[in-house]
Image (tube, helix red, strand yellow):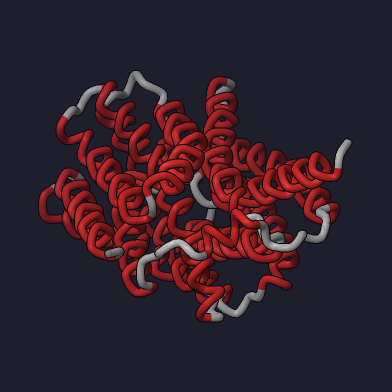
Amino acid sequence: MTELGKNSSSSLQSASCAALIMAIGMGFGRFAFTAVYPHMIDEGIINLQHASLAASANYAGYLFGALFAIKIKSQQSYLGSIIATLGTVVCLILLSCIDTIGLIILIRGLAGVFSAFAMVSASLWLLEQQKQTHQAPILYAGVGLGIALSAELLVFGTHLSWHSKILWLLLGLSSLVFSCIAMFGLSQAQQPNAVSTQQILSTNRKAPHAYALILIYALAGFGYIITATYLPLLVKQALPNIDAAQIWAIFGLGAIPSCFFWHYLHDRLGTRIALASNLGVQAVGVVLPIMLPTALGYLLSALLVGGTFMGTVTIAMPVAQRIARQSKSNLIAIMTVVYGLGQIIGPITANALFTIYHTLNSSLITAATALLIATLISLKSVK
């Protein structure tokens, strides 16, 4: 094999292992709860209020983890990835052993911390430590892969009439297997070569101001989270004959190719147009359940939101890393913090509006409005 072929193979291996970290920390550790909690409600382990508290604790943990991760340097990203992965596995397995509400909420909070560690550490490891900015689509596609894999595992367990505790154990043991593969791959990664000409050219591209990017990212976190939190429950209530976990799997599957699509669009059209297009399509996906409250509407909503929310990350994070190299700051962690803030405010807003209107429609409209504001900011952020 030529030296170029070896480098290409090593680069793909590094990106794939980093994607597995994302799949475990985000797809399994963070988003699997969205598909499991309707089962927990049916079994009487928790109610909707408890589920909302657990979700809020997870978002708060994500914010706390992101705040702590600001201190992580690229040289520490390997250790951070290991901590994130093993911590997530422990949290998933613990959820199979308990039924005390307070402990469930606490563990969901800890899982949020490890999710933030996974996002920041895996991003720093691949984009900064390994100098593989061009592999960002593979990295962030890991989140969609994790959502889809965990959802299909849940469909399998549900088909066998397994209790939610067994479902959590299935997720925990599966993530343990994936974590062993990921950690072995990270340990075998070669030292990065010098920055390529392609990366130098991308570094010189015009990027939005850091403050504009941070604001856009905060609004994006608020805009997508209501759909990401309540979609299976909405489907279960509106269409009881449809397996909500399958719709959730589509949400995750839509995220996998979207990372490559939005990365391609970003390369061809630049940050302003790509980011504005991404957020605009996402806004349409968020309000589709209101416009088209049918199986097709929910399916399209899952595809559009699932097919854009990680695209936002794929566009914004490499740009943040370019800006960070100039400012010597951990902008990836700062953006993860504001994304976490948006995700905390989203469910709080949804609960407040639900108390008033007794429907989630107003919450979906508010979320779509936030995404449209982010779209406008995107169009103005680069001259």
Between 235 and 366, the residue placed more toward the observer is 366
In the displayed structure image, the side of residue 340 where residue 76 appears, left or right: right
Quadrant in the picture for residue 103: bottom right
Residue at 68% over, 48% down: 15
Foreground: 61 or 106? 61
Q: Is residue 190 visible?
A: yes
Residue 381: x and y in percent read: 28, 65
Q: Residue furthest left?
A: 357
Measured as percent of width and height from the top left, residue 172 is found at 67, 44
Left or right of residue 304: residue 101: right
- x then y, percent, for residue 135: 61, 48
Residue 20 lies, in percent from the top left, at: 66, 46
Q: Is residue 75 left or right of residue 106?
A: right
Quadrant where the C terminus lies? bottom left
Instruction: Give 320 or 61, whichever is nearer the viewer.
Output: 320
Q: Residue at x 59, y 62 (%)?
A: 200
In the depicted structure, whether residue 154 falls above or below residue 365: above
Instruction: Give above or below for 57 relative to 236.
Output: below
Looking at the image, the residue that sits furthest to the right is 1
Which quarter of the figure is the N terminus placed in? top right
Residue 316 position by quadrant:
bottom left
Closer-to-camera residue (72/350)? 72
Residue 351 visible: no
> Residue at (51%, 80%) from the top-left corner?
327
Image quadrant where residue 238 sits: top left
Residue shown at 33% from the left, 30% from the top: 236
Q: Please count the marks in the image.
A: 0
Is 250 drawn above or below residue 131 in the view shown?
above
Please state if 273 lies on the left or on the right of 38 as rendered: left
